[in-house]
Image (cartoon, rainbow, N blue to C red):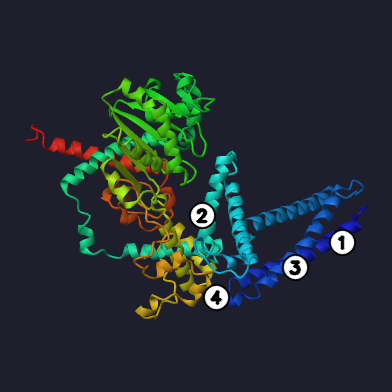
């Protein structure tokens, strides 16, 4: 056909080009599988192969353009099947190029070798010149901008105003300082988390000491108090979940939520003066009604006003528990918790919302609830309102771990109850715990003698199908006890520099020297809800839970598990509390029948 000669040359060149690319990729895969994470020696030829593959992108791009031009040429009179075949190859080429560019943008670290210039915040070093100081400043600024762009990309659906930009910058600086002293890529971190999870499961399978088992045997008085608080927590968790509005309701009722909201949300709407913020279709308020089971007249104030430091909340009358409930939604950043609590405090006091509520129900008690960062905000708000309302109670569900000082945490045990489910990550989030996690990742990755691909493949199999944890050979094998306290050479190679926080984890800090990060704790008394027969499978059913009073030391380390995220979700927390509450109710009914006069 006319133009067939050009087509022949194009297809021949495409075959040669694809063969070269396949050879380069095979070489990349083979060389990448050599050595270990901390032993890159067998992979020293990898940069050359990588640059070779990079050079092949230029003819690949040119050939894709040539194919597109040939396809768009109307003078070519070839068979339809030939043209469709060429169109398919052109589309495939462009898809590969586009996805490759996207992958490079996501994975590529624009800082590169600049990490070697990092200095930790608060550490001074005599720089030889102002030029060196400017270089250090530029490197830190570049790192902050990189992390800020990544966070903006992840939060692309959020309106970008001044408050959000301030929060994004603060979060970016936190990530920059946290990752500045390591030379780990995301796959290294994934391998480290897999190894830590298996090591952790080995420890959990070890038999416990008798003293450790006995220390969890509560007295009857403590058990009765726990049962009461669990029943209250199950009730008030509905309010904390309702603060999320329609997203939570749709998430928990994916098939029927929209139909129910469309049918009911136009009825029984409170006056516009009682609602602040946008709820154009009444979906938020309709969801709150569905979740809590309250009537529209039970709501004193509803705010859907949602900015980073000005978060949604509502105030409602709970006639079942004779309480005025303030339910708080979470905020975007840890730094915003205090500012959000101040915002709600001003609304409750200055705008007379609580006065209005107690005018209607003067005999009711005040209860503040929230989940996740909303639980942290509720805790701070409870502390601020404590003097004005001495009988106040607060239920913080899955609050962030690094929240209160030791003295303030002890003070809140009189009026705050925190509820934590399983291996919840957020309840263990604090800078000392994060530094400890980084140290453990670096150490276990450096000590493992297996290639990274084996760790990842076996780890994926273990997470999905279970089985026994792998016994990976490590450099720790055969070392005496004194040597175990010293960092390995491989471990040193993964640290760009020895940060003070990392050193503090290796050796005992001096008594007179302040810690790099202050130790902060969960608010109030802590109820820890765990699975009786914990299953690693995410899809496991018929889960039975048990609960006990716990202390803050239990949450002094981050636990790696597939459920470290799911245990934090509000529906999982509500399910666990409802299960315990129903079990307690059934036990009470059994005891009532057993000791009834008719039975006697």
Mark positioned earlier in the residue sequence (3 or 4): 3
- The answer to whether residue 242 is seen in the rendering is no
Q: Secondary structure under badge 3?
A: helix
Which residue is disc 3 drawn over? 20
Query: Which is more foreground, mark 1 or mark 4?
Result: 4
Label 1 vs label 2: CA separation?
55 Å
Quadrant the C terminus occupies: top left
Quadrant of residue 317 within the rendered picture: top left
Q: Which one is closest to the eye, mark 3 or mark 4?
A: 4
Give the foreground label among 2 and 3: 2
The mark that comes first in sequence, 1 or 3, is 1
In the image, 41: left or right of 480?
Answer: right
- Find residue 39 and name its label: 4
What residue is pinned by disc 2? 174
- Give the crowd class for mark 3: few <14, some 14-19, many >=20 residues within 10 Å: some
Rendered location of residue 8, percent (x, y):
87, 60
Is disc 4 surrounded by few (<14), some (14 to 19) or many (20+) residues within 10 Å? some
Q: Nearer the viewer, mark 1 or mark 2?
A: 2
Q: CA distance from mark 2 to mark 3?
A: 43 Å
Q: Nearer the viewer, residue 102 or 175?
A: 175
For marks 2 and 3 on the same chain, the one whose residue lies earlier in the sequence: 3
Query: Can you tell which of label 4 and label 2 is closer to the viewer?
Result: 2
Specify which label sits upstream in the sequence, 1 or 4: 1
Report how far apart the C-alphas of labels 1 and 3 lie in the structure: 17 Å
């Amino acid at each position: 056909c006319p133009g067939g000669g050009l087509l022949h040359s194009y297809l021949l060149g495409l075959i040669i080009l694809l063969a070269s690319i396949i050879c380069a990729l095979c070489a990349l895969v083979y060389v990448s599988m050599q050595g270990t994470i901390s032993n890159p020696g067998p992979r020293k030829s990898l940069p050359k192969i990588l640059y070779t593959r990079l050079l092949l992108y230029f003819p690949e791009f040119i050939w894709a353009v040539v194919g597109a031009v040939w396809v768009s040429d109307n003078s070519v009179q070839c068979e339809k099947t030939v043209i469709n075949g060429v169109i398919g190859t052109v589309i495939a080429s462009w898809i590969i190029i586009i996805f490759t560019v996207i992958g490079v943008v996501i994975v590529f670290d624009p800082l590169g070798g600049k990490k070697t210039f990092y200095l930790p915040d608060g550490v001074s070093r005599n720089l030889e010149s102002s030029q060196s100081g400017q270089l250090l400043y530029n490197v830190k600024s570049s790192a902050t901008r990189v992390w800020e762009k990544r966070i903006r990309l992840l939060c692309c659906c959020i309106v970008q105003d001044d408050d959000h930009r301030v929060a994004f910058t603060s979060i970016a600086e936190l990530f920059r300082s946290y990752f500045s002293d390591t030379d780990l890529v995301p796959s290294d971190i994934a391998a480290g988390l897999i190894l830590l999870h298996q090591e952790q499961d080995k420890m959990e399978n070890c038999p416990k000491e008798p003293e450790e088992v006995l220390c969890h045997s509560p007295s009857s008085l403590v058990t009765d108090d726990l049962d009461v608080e669990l029943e209250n927590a199950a009730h008030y968790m509905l309010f904390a979940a309702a603060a999320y509005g329609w997203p939570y309701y749709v998430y928990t009722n994916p098939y029927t939520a929209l139909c129910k909201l469309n049918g009911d949300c136009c009825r029984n709407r409170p006056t516009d003066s009682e609602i602040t913020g946008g709820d154009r279709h009444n979906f938020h308020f309709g969801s709150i009604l569905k979740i809590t089971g309250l009537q529209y007249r039970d709501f004193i104030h509803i705010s859907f006003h949602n900015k980073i430091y000005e978060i949604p909340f509502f105030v409602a009358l709970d006639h079942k528990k004779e309480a005025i409930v303030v339910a708080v939604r979470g905020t975007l950043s840890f730094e915003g918790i205090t500012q959000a609590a101040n915002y709600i405090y001003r609304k409750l006091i200055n705008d007379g919302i609580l006065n209005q509520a107690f005018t209607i129900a003067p005999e009711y008690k005040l209860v503040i609830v929230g989940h996740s960062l909303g639980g942290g905000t509720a805790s701070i708000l409870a502390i601020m309102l404590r003097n004005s309302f001495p009988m106040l109670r607060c239920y913080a569900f899955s609050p962030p771990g690094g929240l209160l000082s030791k003295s303030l945490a002890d003070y809140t045990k009189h009026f705050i109850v925190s509820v934590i489910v399983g291996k919840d990550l957020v309840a263990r989030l604090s800078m000392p715990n994060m530094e400890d996690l980084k140290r453990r990742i670096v150490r276990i990755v450096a000590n493992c003698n297996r290639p990274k691909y084996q760790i990842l493949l076996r780890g994926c199999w273990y997470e999905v199908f279970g089985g026994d944890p792998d016994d990976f050979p490590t450099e720790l094998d055969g070392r005496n006890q004194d040597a175990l306290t010293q960092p390995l050479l491989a471990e040193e190679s993964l640290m760009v520099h020895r940060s003070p926080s990392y050193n503090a984890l290796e050796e005992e800090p001096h008594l007179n020297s302040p810690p790099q990060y202050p130790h902060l704790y969960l608010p109030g008394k802590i109820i820890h809800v765990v699975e009786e027969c914990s299953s690693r499978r995410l899809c496991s059913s018929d889960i039975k839970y048990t609960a006990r009073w716990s202390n803050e030391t239990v949450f002094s380390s981050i636990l790696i598990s597939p459920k470290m995220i799911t245990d934090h979700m509000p529906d999982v927390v509500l399910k666990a509390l409802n299960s315990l509450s129903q079990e307690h109710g059934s036990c009470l009914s059994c005891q009532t029948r057993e000791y009834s006069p008719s039975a006697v």
